[in-house]
Amino acid sequence: MMKVFDVLTQLGPVVMLPIIITLFGLLFRLSFGKALRAGVTIGVGFAGINIVIGYFWGAIAPVAEALAKNTGSTLTVIDLGWPSAAAVAWGSSFAPIMALALLGANVLMLVLNWTKTLNVDIWNFWGVMLLGQIAYYHTQSVGAAIMVSVIVMVLVIFLADRTRNLLYDYFQIPGVSLPHVFTQCAGLIAYPVNWLLDRIPGINKINWSPGNIQKKYGVIGEPLMIGLVVGAVLSAVARMPYQTILTTAMSLAASMVLLPRMVSILMEGLVPIADAANEFMQKKFAGREVYIGMDSAIVLGETANLTTAVLLIPIAIVLAIILPGNKTLPLADLPAIGYMTIISVALCRGNLFRTLVIGTVTLVAVLWTATAMAPAVTVLARQVGFAIPEGTNIITSFCTGMYWFGYLIQEAISKLFMLF
Amino acid sequence: MAKRYTILCACGSSIATSTMVAAKLNDLLQKNNIEATIKKTTYGELDKEVKQLNPDLILSSTNLKEDFGVPCLNALPYLTGVGRAQLDQQILDILKELDK
């Protein structure tokens, strides 16, 4: 079995993914033509992601190095974004086995009446799959890897059940829950901080409304503008010559726009398989009252949430610089902060003061976790063939730091496995 | 010649859910021989995209509170699979109305 994995891994994901995904599609009873098309599309998306990452890296690595040399900055971990992290997770040869294990765990939970959530958000399996792969990196044990991803998924599904009414009351989404790993792990911080804010006299009376901040300043939340401005400012602070400042600004803007496009090609290939899995699961539990587990993107666009996310962008950058122990330089994930604010927005009913306080506290955990997982993520990214040369810099996904809770579980299980 | 429509699909990062929605929409339009340009976008960029592209319809993965002056449907049924046929019909009705 391990031999097969090794051979597949050596071929690289651009070849391996189409083969594996085609087989996976056949397993879900897609026609051969459809399955092959899905598989090849995913391979194409992967090739595209690889090209853009090489380009992005070429632009940002020299700047980060100059930043370290000329300013004494310790932000040597470069944020390549969650779309890249998702591609790493889906690009692993374990991905289909893990996906089956995760579906199986959900079926079992439903059969045993442990949950009402029927999680059909196959794409976002990548989050717990990545945690499992980090466990594999630590332990070289497939058992540990699958155990980590299944346990974290089960916990997230429980949290999705618990937060379902809260989210329904505020966002008015019928029939669904959000077993989204980003959202639920970040949400665990929202509850205690909100509890604390309720008990501080004076502070507990403050209520800010989002108004039209998002409309006015929404432009700073656009990936294109974030790339342009952050690229220019970073290279200027690193005292690069003006030509480099201009090219870095443009290269970063280009990467921020192109990377999600490439990942969405990968997603296009996953759609028929996700649909088939969805249909299979729904047929299995037809006639039962279930919440359909969805991606948090279905509530992300709410005004208070978008406003909080935009205002947290500058806070994230300042925090990254001053937070002791942080080495992560937030870049590609700056537009994705909205995934971590969803529970807090519902909990504080859009009170901007509170969502910003909770968001800032959450960012501390996010930055530390993103820094902690960076060495493993770098190795995993190289394994799937991303063009990241050996050097002083390593990579992470800033927003994947939202998995702080899942990451701690991974650490515990990996330590346990390494004892024996 | 029949009109060529422009339809925007919006979600959080224009990666996952908008791709699911766009795929289902594409199926529907092909089955009914309707020509359209489908563009994926993010909530944050929606305002600008609407001004630039002047779309005929917006399919959003979220309940949008803002009025863009364009017919706007919540595409949740395309993601959950529940109520998909009704959403199909709503889209066809809106497009037919525009063709008059």
Image: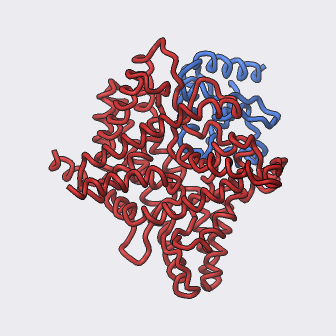
Chain colours: A red, B blue
Residue drawn at x 78%, y 19% as measured from the top left = B100
Could you say where residue B82 lies in the image, as x and y percent from the top left? 56, 20
To which quarter of the image does residue A304 belong?
top right
The foreground one among A323 and A44 is A323
In the rendered view, tell whether residue A198 sits above or below residue A388: above
Name the image quarter holding residue A248.
Answer: bottom right
Report the residue at 44% width, 49% height from top. A406
- In the image, A313: left or right of A394? right
Tell me: A325 left or right of A100.
Answer: right
Residue A385 placement (x, y as % from top left): 34, 60
Q: Position of residue A122 (x, y in %)?
A: 44, 36
Q: Quick one: which residue is furthest to the top in this view? A: A287
Q: Is residue A266 above or below residue A313?
A: above
Question: Left or right of B34: which side holds A327?
Answer: left
Count of all numbered marks drawn on residues in the image: 0
Q: Between residues A108 and A214, which one lies in front from this camera angle?
A: A108
In front here: A243 or A293? A293
Seen at 58% across and 22% down, the residue is B33
Q: Residue at x 33, y 56 (%)?
A: A384
Residue A228 seen from this side: yes
Position of residue A142 measured from the top left corner of the image (x, y, whole percent): 25, 48
Considering depth in this image, is A384 or A285 the residue closer to the camera?
A285
Does residue B80 lie above or below A151 as drawn? above
Quick one: quadrant of the N terminus of chain B?
Answer: top right
In the rendered image, is residue B53 in sight?
A: no
